[in-house]
Image (cartoon, rainbow, N blue to C red):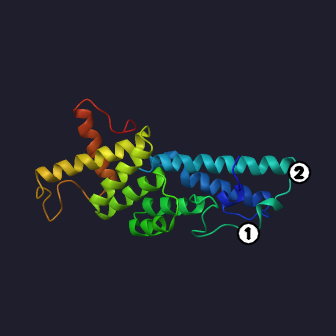
Amino acid sequence: MVSNPYEILGISPNASDDEVKKAYRELSRKYHPDSYANNPLADLAEEKFKEVQEAYNQIMDERSKGYSSSGYGSGSSSGYSGSSSSGGSSSSEMTAVYNFINSRHYQDALNVLNRMSNRDARWYYCSAVANSGLGNNAAALEHARQAVNMEPNNPEYSNFLNQLQWNGQRYQTNPYGGGAGRPAYSTGNCCCDLWIADSCCECMGGDLCPCM
């Protein structure tokens, strides 16, 4: 059960059933896993997709049983509002980070991340992705390592760290091999870089991204 399903759907507790269903359909399309194939943020999209399903089911279940929605407060959430009382990141903040990264607005993603008080493994992973997108490779590598240290069994974090380390090794071997002023370790496209890394891992008998 989620603490505020209306906040997750971005609607008011006073919204009609039709408004609830409309918000649910829009968010389901937005975060559907099929839209994020071969995307480094696929796991975050799947997490958000499941959260939307849970929020919708909870609202409709409560309404069918006649429960009041007044306990959720009034008004819909917007922007990057607030952190939880325990210092954890709010759903709206991490959603904003996720959206900025997916649209390649990496600096905007970092601006939101820097305002968040709780820096868990997901925070460090998103920071690593955003810094990598901006070319801040040292910061990206440091934060990717921190994410893996905090959640060593998370394959998404480990795979991204491996990608960054692989790129760094290529750069040290041939720092000017990229041509036209571009370092050899990057194509300038995070998804393309990830695909290249996966292809090389497969050549060596590994598999960086099983979905590719």
Determine contact: label 2, label 1, CB under 8 Å.
no
> Which three-letter amino acid code belongs to the residue tagged 2?
Gly
164, 188: nearer the viewer: 164
In the rendered view, does 29 fall on the left or right side of 182?
right
Q: Amino acid at mark 1?
A: Gly
Element on which disc 1 rests = loop
Q: Residue at x 46, y 56 (%)?
A: 123
Q: Residue at x 49, y 53 (%)?
A: 120
Query: Percent from the top left, x then y, of residue 153?
Result: 43, 37
Q: Residue furthest right?
A: 66
Is 172 displayed left or right of 197 in the figure? left
Closer to the camera in the image, 85 or 60: 85
Residue 51, above or below 111: above
Q: Is residue 61 visible?
A: yes
Q: Residue 126 in the image: x percent, y percent?
A: 43, 56
Task: Give x and y (percent) for residue 66.
Answer: 88, 51
The residue positioned 17% from the left and 49% from the top of the image is: 170
The residue carrying mark 2 is: 66
Please provide percent x and percent y for residue 201.
Answer: 26, 37
* Disc 1: which residue: 75
| Distance Cα–Cα, label 2 vs label 1 | 20 Å
